[in-house]
Image (tube, grey):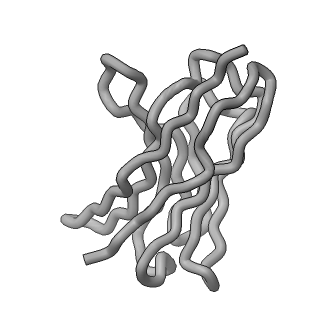
Amino acid sequence: QVQLVESGGGLVQPGGSLRLSCAASESIVGFYTVGWYRQILGNEREFVAMIAQTDHTAYADFVKGRFAISRDNANNTMYLQMNSLQPDDTAVYYCRARNPGQEYWGQGTQVTVSS
């Protein structure tokens, strides 16, 4: 059972930046994809960004040009650099690791964008 632990959330002013981390209990190299999702209060969980084994990346339209996903395979960690944050980005952010037929989620980290 893979454990994923997010960190790096917090309160930031509009226009500010945060970097989220997701530390895995084992290697993330073997996962088909690893990525980030978010859940805005009262809404469904939604896709934010992903990176595949091939290093192909994909982003939701609402974060393109502002967020960047990356991973450090040596340290079993992936990151989400978030820039130009806006109040609409306020949400709980979750990391996910996926193989066909398997998926693992972290517990989430709260990001609040407010002045």
Q: Is residue 110 above or below residue 36?
A: above
Q: Nearer the viewer, residue 103 or 88?
A: 88
Q: Nearer the viewer, residue 93 or 65?
A: 93
Taking the image as shown, residue 54 lies to the left or right of residue 109, namely: right
Q: Quadrant of residue 114?
A: top right
Q: Quadrant of residue 25?
A: bottom left
- Residue 47: x and y in percent read 44, 38
Taking the image as shown, residue 97 lies to the left or right of residue 19, namely: left
Q: Is residue 13 above or below residue 8?
A: above
Q: Is residue 6 above or below residue 113?
A: below
How many labels sit on residues?
0
Quadrant location of the N terminus in the rendered image = bottom left
What residue is rendered at 63% in x and 58% in y? Answer: 79
Q: Nearer the viewer, residue 101 or 111?
A: 111
What residue is rendered at 55% in x and 58% in y? Answer: 51
Q: Quadrant of residue 115?
A: top right
Taking the image as shown, residue 26 lies to the left or right of residue 76, namely: left
Q: Nearer the viewer, residue 64 or 96?
A: 96
- Residue 101: x and y in percent read 19, 65
- Residue 107: x and y in percent read 36, 52
What residue is rendered at 66% in x and 60% in y? Answer: 70
- Residue 15: x and y in percent read 80, 23
